Amino acid sequence: MKQIETYQHKKILVLGLAKSGVTAAALLHKLGAFVTVNDMKPLSENPEAQGLLEQGIKVICGSHPIELLDEGFELIVKNPGIPYYNPMIEGALEKGIPVITEVELAYQISEAPFIGVTGTNGKTTTTTLVFEMLNEGKKQPLVAGNIGTVASGVAEEATMENTIVIELSSFQLMGIETFNPKIAIITNLYDAHLDYHGTRKEYISAKANITKNQTELEYLIINADQEETMEIARHSKAKIIPFSTKRELTDGAFIRDGWIMFQDEKVMEISEIALPGVHNLENILSAMAAAKLSGVENNAIQEVLRTFTGVRHRLQYVDAINGRKFYNDSKATNSLATIKAITAFKGSVVLLAGGLDRGNEFDELLPYLKNVKALITFGQTAPKIERVGHMAGIKLISRVDNVDKAVPEAYRISEPGDVILLSPACASWDQYKSFEVRGDIFIEAVHKLK
């Protein structure tokens, strides 16, 4: 870790805890800052805050008192999930107090360079693939960010021998100032989190922050099949490495005659790749490009692609029961992710879908429901998804209370040879703390059924 003096004796407010807030507060305390933590959860129900209090950090819990902003803070480190229209954030910006997320803090202290991955879909799979390829290539990678490990905590332990592969959300990227990855990847861009960002333009602008500090010394790996991603590339100063599943690109990653290619070099035959789904070729091409730019040999890339079958909660094979195969795709929190999951299978599918209602409809699913023989719905969006199911002519539609009850119901109406797929097309927060919890309940329900 770099022993920076940037925050010594500075008064800093950490707004919102969770894992990132706890790690950031403790780190800033070590760096000599005067830290105050503010979290909505009452202190009596907040063991994380109690732990910070024991370290000598000032803790204010139970509300976000706006008068806190009058205490002369020089910086706010906010939880990524707190929107910029929150009164505390609005008030801070009006007073000219800088607001960052802990990703920026991680970059400032890190001795290791970063490979940053963002986009609407495929971030976790791509991040994991890059990590595995670098690991197989003996490049000593570490993994961090939105994938589950706090970036600033990883950066504390990283050395110049490491590379930090970090998954980045649009929320995190809105709070950076100097963050500059050696290699940045934008997998794709579709409508998502518009309840947070307000407009698609603002969402895309947040994603584009991943390259805003890059120079001609860094690389931006970009989806050449989308005009919006290429527009970001046109405004980037980085060296552009495009990837495409639709056309040949001699300056990037692409497909030719059943091979994945990098700058006209054959890397691996697609038929040998273990990861299912056409959509995963995007993730594979972008990860392979990052690995090649990092000096990983083809044999290491091939070994990963022959053995890697997916990440937990993203088209994860769970089990087979009497000829039915169960797949957990709980990370599919929007329609596009569900479309990609459905189209990964050629046979008949029993689809389990539903969750938090963000105000959107699901008509974009309609053209892709041809192989969905039955639909099991749950959560706030159940009526909306059922409407699209009826429009698609699906005869077997059943509503249940939750994912736990969806599994035996799906089995009841299925037949040998069917795929039973949890791919909700919605966030989980109406019923579950996270998509991970929702996916774990699905897995447990499958095991109970067996």
Image: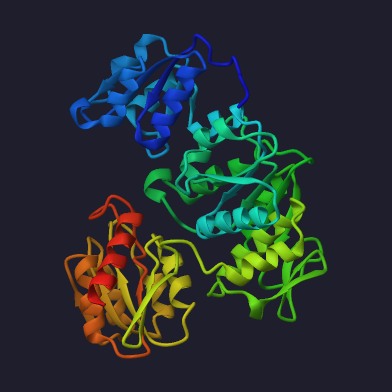
User: At 45% across and 48% down in the image, what residue appears?
Assistant: 199
Left or right relative to 204: residue 81: left
User: At 64% across and 53% down in the image, what residue appears?
Assistant: 135
Residue at far bottom of view: 416
Vertical side of 72 occupied by 269: above or below: below
The one of 266 and 123 positioned closer to us in this rendering: 266
Which image quadrant: the C terminus?
A: bottom left
Which image quadrant: the N terminus?
A: top right
Q: Position of residue 272 (x, y in %)?
A: 65, 78
Q: Position of residue 174 (x, y in %)?
A: 51, 37
Q: Position of residue 267 (x, y in %)?
A: 75, 69
Vertical side of 369 occupied by 306: above or below: above
User: At 71% across and 80% down in the image, what residue appears?
Assistant: 258
Res 210 seen here: yes
The one of 179 and 158 positioned closer to us in this rendering: 158
The one of 225 and 304 positioned closer to us in this rendering: 304
Q: How is the image coloured?
A: rainbow
The one of 200 and 312 positioned closer to us in this rendering: 312
Residue 260 placement: quadrant: bottom right
Res 96 seen here: no
Q: Position of residue 265 (x, y in %)?
A: 82, 68
**Number of numbered labels in the structure image:** 0
